[in-house]
Image (cartoon, grey):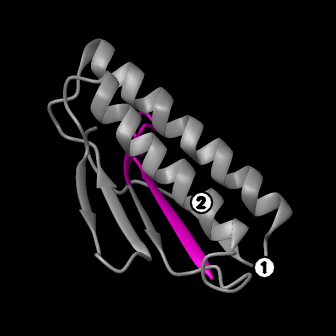
Amino acid sequence: MIRLTIVRNEENRTIHSFELSGHANAAEYGEDIVCAGVSAVAIGTVNAIEALCEQPLTIQSEDDGGYLYGEVPHSWTGRVAEDGQLLLEGMVVALKSIQQSYDEFIHVIEISGGADKC
């Protein structure tokens, strides 16, 4: 199962970080549409932030797939923060939509209070 954990700032509810881990195992390797969809949304969001915002996320990943961690830099302010947060919220909406159709393969968790400032 794929697990997405979103950590939000308790004060203003912005996203501080996300962690995506696991494998859907919905089909054979290379034919798993759940895995492909989740990967496309998450990697597309990270790439969009890198291309469109002045300061990319801090990223950790594993070479074999199955793990992606993104953290918002403390230096995000003003327009960069607004744009970056909008892209991250779009990612959450898209992944929750996948969860609605494939809830046996992906689970989205949101946590508040994980960081004091985003």
What is the CA distance from the residue labelled 1 to the residue labelled 2? 14 Å
Q: Is residue 54 visible?
A: yes
* Element marked by disc 2: helix
- Tell me if residue 83 is in the magenta stretch: no
Residue bounds of the magenta highlight: 1-17
Is 40 placed left or right of 15 in the picture? right
- Residue at (82% x, 59% y) in the render: 100
Disc 2 target residue = 38
- Residue at (66% x, 85% y) in the render: 25
* Element marked by disc 1: loop
Location of the N terminus (image quadrant): bottom right
Label 2: how many Cα within 10 Å (few below 14, some 14–19, many 20+):
many
Disc sitting over residue 81 in the figure: none
- Residue at (49% x, 64% y) in the render: 5
In the image, 118 versus 116, the foreground residue is 118
Is 79 placed left or right of 35 in the picture? left
In the image, 6 versus 43, the foreground residue is 43
Q: Is residue 9 visible?
A: no
Compared with 69, 66 (above or below) is below
Compared with 117, 83 (above or below) is above
In the image, 85 versus 28, the foreground residue is 28
Horizontal and vertical percent position of residue 96: 70, 53
Is 103 placed left or right of 79 in the picture? right
Compared with 37, 32 (above or below) is below
Location of the C terminus (image quadrant): top left
Disc 1 target residue = 104
